[in-house]
Image (spheres, helix red, strand yellow):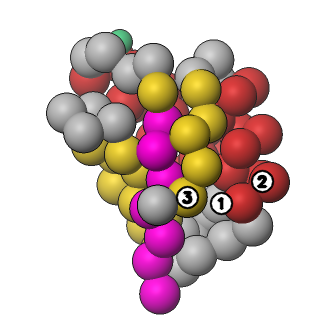
Amino acid sequence: MLKTYKVEGMTCCGCSSAVAKALQEALPGATIDVNVAVSEVTIEPACDDDLVKNVIEEAGFDYGGPL
Ligand SMILES: [Cu+2]
């Protein structure tokens, strides 16, 4: 099962790469898909919301919660 989160503050592919890299390091083995155009991140399998929030905020972006 996958889960989609809103992530604000991504403006270019550099931002999306940074978010993807941070999430991938925190969730080895997960499939991470970052869509900068709609400010969304998809993670499969679903994981803990607080972990996602922490990783996104530590990477310097704004966590917008699960969709
Ligand atoms: Cu950027």
Is residue 46 magenta-colored?
Answer: no
In the image, the residue with mark 3 has its CB under 8 Å from the nearest atom of ligand 1: no
- Residue that mark 1 sits on: 27
Q: Are marks 2 and 1 in contact (CB under 8 Å)?
A: yes
SS majority, magenta? strand
Q: Nearer the viewer, mark 2 or mark 1?
A: 2
* Dot 2 amino acid type: Leu
Answer above or below: position of 48 versus 14.
Answer: below
- Identity of the residue drawn at 78% across and 40% down: 54
The amino acid on which the numbered mark 3 sits, given as a three-letter code, is: Pro
Return the residue at label 2.
Answer: 51
Q: Position of residue 38 (x, y in %)?
A: 24, 39
Q: CA distance from mark 1 to mark 3?
A: 17 Å
Q: CA distance from mark 2 to mark 1?
A: 9 Å
Q: Callout 2: helix, strand or loop?
A: helix
Query: Which tag, 2 or 3, sits closer to the chain's start?
Result: 2
Q: Is residue 63 above or below residue 48?
A: above
The disc, 1 or 3, on the residue closer to the chain's N-terminal end is 1
Q: Residue 34 appears in which quarter of the rendering?
A: top left
Of circles 1 and 3, which is in front?
A: 3
> From this viewpoint, is residue 6 visible?
yes
Residue drawn at x 27%, y 33% as measured from the top left: 36
Q: Quadrant location of ligand 1?
A: top left
> Mark 3 sits on what residue?
66
SS at mark 1 in the image: loop
Binning the other alpha carbons within 10 Å of mark 3 as few (below 14), some (14 to 19) or many (20 upward) gives some
Q: Which residues are magenta?
A: 1-7
Indicate the position of residue 33 as horizontal and vertical percent values. Answer: 34, 54
Q: Of helix, strand and loop, which one carries label 3?
A: strand
Q: Residue shown at 48%/36% (left/top)?
A: 7
Q: Amino acid at mark 1?
A: Leu
